[in-house]
Image (cartoon, grey):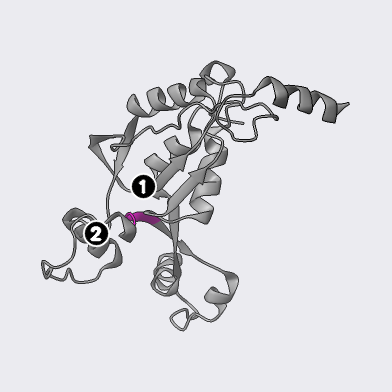
Amino acid sequence: MGGFAAKDKVYVVQTNRIVIERCLLMTTDPGDLVLDPTCGSGTTAYVAEQWGRRWITIDTSRVALALARTRLMAAKYPYYLLAGSAEGRKKEAALSGAKLEASSGKQPEGDIRKGFVYKRVPHITLKSIANNPDIREGMTREEIDEAIARHANTEYLYDQPYQLSKTVRVCGPFTVESLSPHRVLAPADENMDGYVSQRRRRRARISRI
């Protein structure tokens, strides 16, 4: 697939970032929690961080966790325009043509759960053109295009949010947690205290026979 060369792989089973990105954008919203029980090189966490999703990733390999941690700490992301920020509200008002309402001050500034300001395109169908009340016989092509644009539905491009070109974002704070190494207990250790007497060992051998 495009955008993924063999030299870009840092882990043997590393997944194409574009595949994870498409799945995440189709099934989650900004602020949602994404769980990846097989961390690998950290592609899911990387993509989730880029698109404003919270994430938890798990792996039994210390190598995989080290690779993912290094990848996230060294990553640089584009800064997408938040719909809940002052700049985002201005941009949204300019795109929709609505009047910008003054903020009451009670709304949290830059709430990621409100999403980003996305690019949008008119969604035009043959039915919308045929039922357009502003299209009349004798109109020029420019007038027809304007009439279609006035009544066309808007389709949001959720993979194309507006971004601030002069601002670069890094990964937010995260923690790496691990469990203590597990002890391997013998089947004859009935008390699970790490000690097996000679009598228990003999009894275990007899029962296996």
Q: Residues within 10 Å of mark 1 (few under 14, many from 20)?
A: some
User: In front here: 206 or 95?
Assistant: 206
Residue in the picture at 45% in, 32% down:
179
Residue in the picture at 84% in, 26% down:
206
Point out residue 165 in the picture as x, y percentages from the top left corner: 26, 37
Point out residue 122 in the picture as x, y percentages from the top left corner: 45, 63
Q: Quadrant of the C terminus?
A: top right
Query: What segment carries the magenta color?
Result: 115-119
User: In front here: 55 or 166?
Assistant: 55
Q: Is residue 79 left or right of residue 37?
A: left
Decide: is 7 above or below 186: above
The alpha-carbon separation of the residues under discs 2 and 1 comes to: 13 Å
Decide: is 26 above or below 37: below
Name the residue furthest right.
Answer: 209
**Residue 52, disc:** 1
Label 2, secondary structure: give it: loop
Point out residue 131 in the picture as x, y percentages from the top left corner: 53, 81
Main secondary-structure element of the magenta-colored stretch: loop
Decide: is 19 above or below 209: below
Q: Which residue is mark 2?
A: 84
Q: Is residue 129 left or right of residue 177?
A: right
Tag 2: amino acid: Gly
Residue in the picture at 54% in, 25% down:
61
Q: Quadrant of the N terminus?
A: top right
Label 1, secondary structure: give it: loop
Of labels 2 and 1, earlier in sequence is 1
Name the residue furthest front.
Answer: 199
Q: Is residue 52 magenta?
A: no
Q: Residues within 10 Å of mark 2 (few under 14, many from 20)?
A: many
Q: Are marks 2 and 1 in contact (CB under 8 Å)?
A: no
Point out residue 77 in the picture as x, y percentages from the top left corner: 33, 34
